Amino acid sequence: MTATASARTLLPPRLATGRIIAVLRAPRVDALAPVCDVLVEEGILGLELTLTTPDLLGSVRRLIDRYSGSADVGLGTVTTTEQAQQGIDAGAAFLVTPAMNLPVIDRAVASSIAVIPGGLTPSELITGWDAGATAVKIFPAQTVGPDYLRHLHGPFPGLPAVPSGGIDLDSTHDWLAAGAVAVSLGGPLLGDALTGGDLEQLRERCRAIRAVVDHAPRT
């Protein structure tokens, strides 16, 4: 299934404007809300709740409803069409996959929900784009670095890409300058917040990354 430019689902508006996706891999589902509250309060408005969190699907609708008026909440680490459908039914704003999963892309496209599938090679990434992906996730991004995206934009100008995996404060600016439409941030942003760490330190990291993104170029 190939989406035309006019039919392709766009990135959710808060995520597109804020250009940050916080990737939340929690040991317990009840650890998510206090951390998400701080993220949203500090302007991190793209929240990826990953299916590696035990029992997430049982609570995902409640969490999506909690932030429906203030953030774009998506479902991450989606590997099956069944998981994709559960996210769609719960009202997720976007889906993220760790690999180039064409059936999941097809399900998202058919439901007009944004989908960001993961890949690394040019063949993987353009396959996802041609299948109708909203953007493609360069994963693991730390392995290749921001220059990789600049090289990709030679043969694939304008390919919307979201780097994920090992992105820190310093490299966030470099990826955005290289043309990324957003960056996915896990440990370097969240630290130990999901395991009982200091939420005020999380707040400080949010403000620091927000300042970097707000001053990074838009391509």
Image (tube, rainbow, N blue to C red):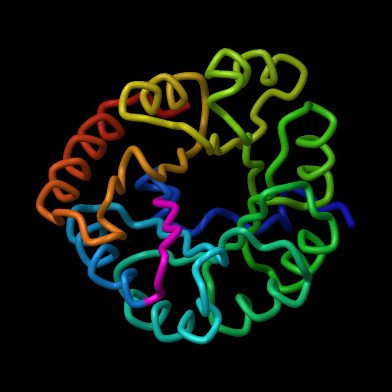
Residue with the most extreme left position: 200
Quadrant where the N terminus lies? bottom right
Residue occupying image coordinates x 67% and y 49%: 98
Residue occupying image coordinates x 64% and y 29%: 158
Report which quarter residue 145 is drawn in: top right
- Relative to 1, 217 lies left or right: left
How far across and how far down the image is residue 124, in percent? 81, 36
- Relative to 47, 43 lies left or right: left
Is 32 rendered above or below residue 120?
below
Residue occupying image coordinates x 71% and y 53%: 6
Report which quarter residue 209 is drawn in: top left
Residue occupying image coordinates x 33% and y 80%: 66
Q: What stretch is highlighted in magenta?
A: 22-29
Magenta-span inclusion, residue 106: no
Is 201 rendered above or below residue 150?
below
What is the tally of numbered marks visible in this picture? 0
Instruction: Return the residue nearer the eye: 139 or 43.
Output: 139
Is 122 rendered above or below residue 129?
above
Instruction: Return the residue nearer the eye: 47 or 201.
Output: 201
How far across and how far down the image is residue 105, in percent? 77, 59
How far across and how far down the image is residue 174, in percent? 42, 19
How far across and how far down the image is residue 23, in percent? 44, 52
- Relative to 163, 187 lies left or right: left
Instruction: Return the residue nearer the eye: 111 or 4.
Output: 111
